[in-house]
Image (spheres, rainbow, N blue to C red):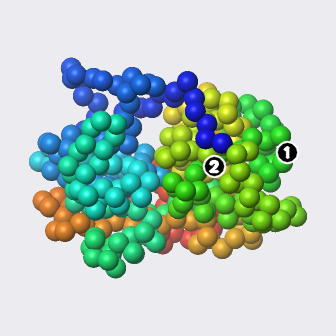
Amino acid sequence: MVAKSPIPLTWPNESAAGALENTGNLTIDGSNILLDLHGDPLRAQLAVFSDGNHNMALEETLRAFLSANGEADDVFYATTPPRIIIDALTSGKICSGNIVLSVSPHVFISPDSIMNKLSAEGRVGPSMPYMRSDGLSILIAKENPCNIVEAADLLKDGVRLAVSNPITETASFVIYEAALMAIGARSGLDKTYIHNYLRSDTVAKSRLIHHREIPQIIASGDADASVIYHHLALRFTRIFPDKFELLKVDLQGLMEPAAYLTTYHAALVGDGGAFGNKLMDFLMCETVTKIYGEHGLLRPDSRFDRT
């Protein structure tokens, strides 16, 4: 089931340069809204293409970078599933609705498996790991109407589950599916059953961008809960405290950390332009460690002692 809702969540501004005033504004929830392309591509001296799962931390990072490098004027950045920004990297164009932007990135950010492939193909430079996720959480509708107290409850009869789309967002779905299989196996559920269940119409799916659509599905009453990256659940409960609660998932002893932790890599595209190398250096500074830490993400060399 792909859920559609007439009651859109109101997301905050996420551009690196902050909200603009006194501009022609065509934005209205449910009609014309563009959430994952940020900034002014004509004015910006730095363009960044990134997967969207850590968009909240990347926003603050790029805002801090722009504050320290004002001559960059602005940072244009995209935060979409990797498939979309890879297509944009290839074509030199990214579009939404009727607008087409001819823009190429100076820096590319995505999970390690994707970046290793792009680097091997010569499409980006050598990549460096700079952050990782800190496990998974359950995002639950406010007041927890299904009384979910542990991850196994997500697979009980009567609980309406939402997950990312296995076709359009394979990278996140694979992690969520593996976690639910491990959790279900502990309760005696067959992995084939879980595999088929997650792909069935019984489970609500995002269409394209689960870091926007999963909270929308739950807020609209089309699902009760979802398993999702902890840093995303943390973000949703912070900006929509009247809509959601979270419950951290304990996977210790069920899975190897590498199976449910995602490491994010960054690489230059070409020579990186005037500011690409500066951003790569900035990504490793203590300011960025603190920003990502506040959003529930860690440096890759942090101990795997939390889930």
Image quadrant assignment for residue 112? bottom left
Three-letter amino acid code at the position of disc 2: Val
Mark 2 falls on what kind of element? strand
Mark 1 falls on what kind of element? loop
Q: In this view, does 306 lie to the left or right of 269?
A: right
Q: In this view, does 116 lie to the left or right of 191?
A: left
Q: In this view, does 262 lie above or below 45?
A: below
Residue drawn at x 75%, y 54% as measured from the top left: 197
Residue 122 pos. (x, y %): 27, 76
In the picture, the quarter occupied by the C terminus is bottom right
Circle 2 sits on which residue?
163
Q: Give the Cα distance between marks 2 and 1.
A: 16 Å
Residue 88 pos. (x, y %): 30, 56
Circle 1 sits on which residue?
157
In the picture, the quarter occupied by the N terminus is top right
Residue 139 pos. (x, y %): 65, 43
Three-letter amino acid code at the position of disc 1: Asp
Mark closer to the chain start, 2 or 1: 1
Q: Do callouts 2 and 1 mark residues in contact (Cβ within 8 Å)?
A: no
Q: In this view, does 196 lie to the left or right of 240?
A: right
| Mark 1: few/some/many CA within 10 Å (<14, 14-19, 20+) | few
Residue 20 pos. (x, y %): 24, 28
Q: Is residue 204 left or right of residue 134?
A: right
Image quadrant assignment for residue 288? bottom left
Residue drawn at x 88%, y 64% as measured from the top left: 188
In the rendered image, the residue lying farthest to the right is: 188
Residue drawn at x 80%, y 61% as measured from the top left: 193
Q: Viewer-proximal residue, 128 or 81?
A: 81
Q: Is residue 57 visible?
A: no
